Amino acid sequence: MKHTDIKTIFEDKGLVGGKVTVCGWVRTARNSKNMAFMELNDGTTLNHLQIVIDKALGIDFEDALKLGTAVRVTGTAVASEQNGVEINAEGIDVIGECPAEYPLQKKRHTLEYLRTMPHLRGRTNTFNAVFRVRSVAAAAIHEFFQSQNYVYVNTPLITGSDCEGAGEMFQVTTIGYSDKYKSADEYYADDFFGKRAGLSVSGQLEGEVAAMAFGKIYTFGPSFRAENSNTPRHVAEFWHVEPEIAFAQLDEVIEIAEEMIKFVIGRILEKCPSEMKFFDQRFENGLIQKLEDLISHDFAVCTYTEAIELLKKADIEFAYPVEWGLDLQTEHERYICEKVFGRAVFVTNYPREIKSFYMKQNDDGKTVAAVDLLVPGVGEIIGGSEREANYDKLVAEMQRRGMDMAPYGDYLDLRRFGSVPHGGFGLGFERLIMYVTGMSNIRDVILYPRTVGGIR
Ligand code: 4AD
Ligand code: MG
């Protein structure tokens, strides 16, 4: 169906005075004595296009006034003081009828209610804005890395090794376990791959393989975590941006993370002004200012040890204990970035016991060259590190942890054949979108959230 995007109708002043055809769904409708009006949205912009129907013209429009109806309108584009542009209708075709049971009748619904209809909620202003920002952010991530000689690689989603070693891997199998197997090994041997396989929690290990060949790489794809945590910040399937850089040490990893975040947010502010204004008004007052401040100041940096000292000095009661060696909980992360620094902060050099096996071991013997980026309102959005590039040290750590070395042969080979210092990080894409839109639940920034007990 040849037609013009509503976004173009608003932007291309050359169309005013001419004939146009637009398609979209009816968002509001009003019927008065001599005139009828409807507002049309086709998803290309947050702005609704007003269609003016002069009843004297005898256009058949009654069915088109029902909310949710899909229509095609032909008419003349005219300048309007209130709306910028509107259409004086000359012909209206109903393309898809919509009965009164269409659930989006009211102007505003709660986000919880909209979560019950992921297939329809995209037709609200909120989700229209979220998904456009998400799309622009994804393009900006590619732009950032592509403009700096990074190679975009696609790492496997089905894997035999648990990168984070946290036991949160979904199993991939074509057969159910049955009594006929005497052991788990026997069962896995009989399965599709002949050994235990799962959905990848991170593309990092294969990302390192690629970085040892192409120098600078990034992945951007889904990661899966069977975390049994029903929080506003966790989904079982999230999108993960993972750069890996050869010859980079921790300070360079931190620099790249800061530059990337600033670049992406800058692009969003530039390309999505009306969406960002919408979020500022509806979800987080001061959001735009917050982001402008973020991109124009250095992020703070503090070590884990300093963070623990700050938390111990805090004059508030935390629900979880604060002790050197314990992991930081969300409440601690938020205190550090919201109350202490009031901005984004990199926390570095965590105790080795609470981080993954692959992180570079610091000379103190107690900490590793890890980094998390914490932001106000959300907490951790990035986790990364310099990697242990020394074969003997890495093997010793894996043995100390009692890991099965078999799935990591390729990974260890990288430390045997021309090993170099390297590092990278993982950005939780949905967490970034939460931060830039002010949406407080991760379920509202992904098309179909996968959570414990929730699949559709
Ligand atoms: O901190 P994580 O576990 O780090 C890694 O996976 C490393 N292999 C990354 C690397 O160095 N290449 O995860 C990275 C980020 C977290 O900071 C968080 O933003 C996001 O991934 N993340 C999740 N987002 C949504 N739901 C979940 N269940 C998430 N788990 C991690
Ligand atoms: Mg982490």
Image (cartoon, rainbow, N blue to C red):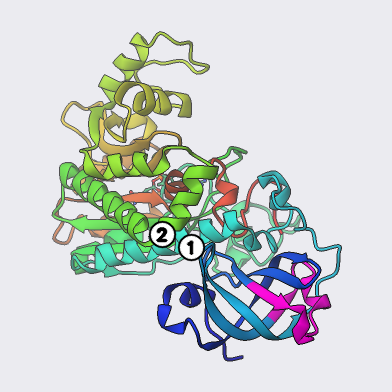
| Element type where label 2 sits in the image | loop
Q: Which residue is painted at 32% across and 66% down in the image?
A: 142
Residue 356 visible in the shown view: no
Q: Give the extent of the magenta segment.
A: 51-71
Mark nearer the N terminus (2 vs 1): 1
Identify the amino acid type marked 1.
Arg
- Residue under circle 1? 132
Mark 2 or 1, closer to the camera = 2
Looking at the image, is 197 positioned above or below residue 299? below
Residue 206 percent location from the top left of the image = 34, 62
Looking at the image, is 263 positioned above or below residue 312? below
Within 10 angstroms of label 1, few (less than 14), some, or many (20 or more) residues?
Answer: some
Q: Please say whether residue 103 is one of the residues in the magenta stretch.
A: no
CA separation in Å, label 2 and label 1: 8 Å
- Residue under circle 2? 272
Looking at the image, is 255 positioned above or below residue 347? below
Nearer to me, 41 or 129: 41
Q: Please say whether residue 70 is one of the residues in the magenta stretch.
A: yes
Dots 2 and 1: beta carbons under 8 Å?
yes
Residue 443 percent location from the top left of the image = 60, 49
